[in-house]
Image (cartoon, rainbow, N blue to C red):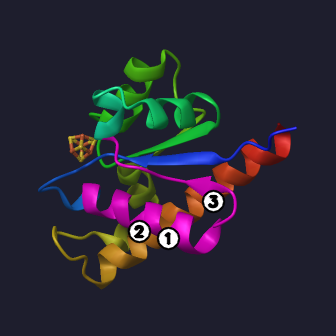
């Protein structure tokens, strides 16, 4: 039996602080919180129909992380593999529950941005556990 992993796909978010938070949260999950259970790759690989990226996405659970309501990562997954992400986390939703962590820094996160990224990562880690424990 092949054990599935959770593929974590953040939006690119260039020029947007919430996109930076989404990427940083992904690193925290993949490199720290759920190292053995998760993988990630560059989202644009789906747009160019990269076979390895498509196979990984189709054969595992997918959690998209989006900076804002445009939901680019969620939509990219759906368009690329014909099904929606198994779970979706929105940075703005996490911020609404943690208003003290508002950040404006884009390239390098300030302390608030780092704290928000960790909150997002913890939310994603919960989704990883739900998906892998229930299936
Ligand atoms: S979801 Fe929002 S922040 Fe992320 S890439 Fe799309 S527009 Fe940018």
Q: Is residue 21 visible?
A: yes
Residue at far left of view? 15
User: For this view, does 79 lie left or right of residue 109?
Assistant: right
Depth check, front residue: 104 or 121: 121
State which mark lies toward you, 2 or 1: 1
Q: SS at mark 1?
A: helix
Residue in the picture at 40% in, 70% down: 116
Q: SS at mark 2?
A: helix
Q: CA distance from mark 2 to mark 1?
A: 8 Å
Q: Can you identify the residue that label 1 sits on?
A: 28
User: For this view, does 90 lie left or right of residue 35?
Assistant: left
Q: Give above or below for 120 relative to 45.
A: below
Q: Is residue 71 visible?
A: no
Q: Can you identify the residue that label 3 sits on?
A: 125
Figure quadrant of the C terminus? top right
Q: Residues within 10 Å of mark 2 (few under 14, many from 20)?
A: many
Q: SS at mark 3?
A: helix
């Amino acid at each position: 039996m092949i054990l599935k992993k959770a593929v974590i796909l953040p939006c690119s978010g260039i020029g947007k602080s919430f996109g930076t938070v989404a990427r940083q949260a992904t690193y925290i999950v993949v490199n720290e919180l759920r190292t053995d259970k998760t993988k990630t790759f560059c989202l644009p690989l789906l747009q160019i129909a990269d076979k390895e990226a498509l196979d990984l996405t189709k054969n595992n659970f997918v959690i998209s992380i989006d900076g804002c309501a445009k939901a680019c990562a969620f939509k990219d997954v759906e368009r690329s593999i014909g099904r929606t992400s198994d779970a979706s986390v929105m940075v703005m939703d996490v911020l609404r529950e943690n208003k003290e962590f508002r950040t404006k820094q884009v390239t390098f996160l300030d302390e608030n941005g780092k704290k928000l990224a960790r909150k997002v990562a913890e939310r994603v880690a919960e989704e990883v556990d739900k998906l892998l424990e229930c299936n």
